[in-house]
């Protein structure tokens, strides 16, 4: 922070650090892997659309590559939490 201005790089790294860190502040490897997979698929899709000059939708393989890791992360977070979403409620 120089002269009272916040650097864009500092803001971006702080934002990404908040995304990949767990509640205790440690980096989550599952969140990092999910971010890499989603970023790669979106980059490839964008690159293809720009180079061909068309706007194509996602096919099933791309949707599975996008939603699979995100769905698994939501499931994992539910299993780690102590709330009723972990499937271990008493009956």
Image (tube, grey):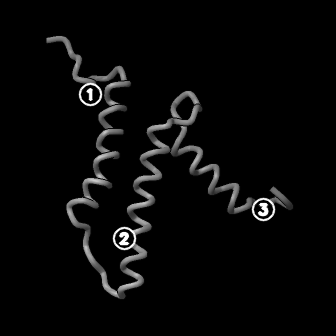
Q: Residue at left 80%, top 55%?
A: 1
* Disc on the earlier residue, 2 or 1: 2
Give me the C-alpha separation between circle 1 and circle 3: 42 Å
Q: Residue at left 34%, top 46%?
A: 70
Residue at image mark 2? 45
Helix, strand or loop at label 2? It is helix
Instruction: Please give the count of numbered marks on the rendered protein.
Output: 3
Give me the C-alpha separation between circle 2 and circle 1: 33 Å
Marks 2, 1: nearer the viewer? 2
* Disc on the earlier residue, 2 or 3: 3
Q: Position of residue 25 (x, y in %)?
A: 59, 32
Q: Quadrant of residue 81?
A: top left
Q: Position of residue 17 (x, y in %)?
A: 59, 45
Marks 1, 3: nearer the viewer? 1
Q: Which mark is residue 85?
A: 1
Q: Quadrant of residue 84?
A: top left
Q: Are marks 2 and 3 in contact (CB under 8 Å)?
A: no
Number of residues whose C-alpha sits closer than 10 Å to that of mark 3, classed few (under 14), some (14–19) or many (20 or more): few
Q: Nearer the viewer, residue 31 or 40?
A: 40
Residue 2 falls left or right of residue 10: right
Q: Is residue 30 above or below residue 44?
A: above
Q: Which mark is residue 21?
A: none
Give me the C-alpha separation between circle 2 and circle 3: 35 Å
Residue at image mark 3? 5
């Amino acid at each position: 922070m120089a002269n009272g201005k916040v650097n864009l790089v500092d803001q971006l790294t702080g934002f990404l650090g908040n995304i990949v860190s767990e509640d205790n502040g440690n980096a989550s490897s599952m969140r990092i892997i999910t971010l890499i997979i989603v970023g790669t698929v979106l980059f490839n899709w964008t690159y293809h659309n720009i180079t061909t000059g068309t706007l194509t939708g996602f096919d099933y393989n791309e949707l599975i590559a996008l939603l699979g890791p995100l769905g698994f992360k939501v499931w994992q977070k539910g299993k780690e939490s102590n709330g009723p979403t972990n499937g271990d409620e008493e009956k």
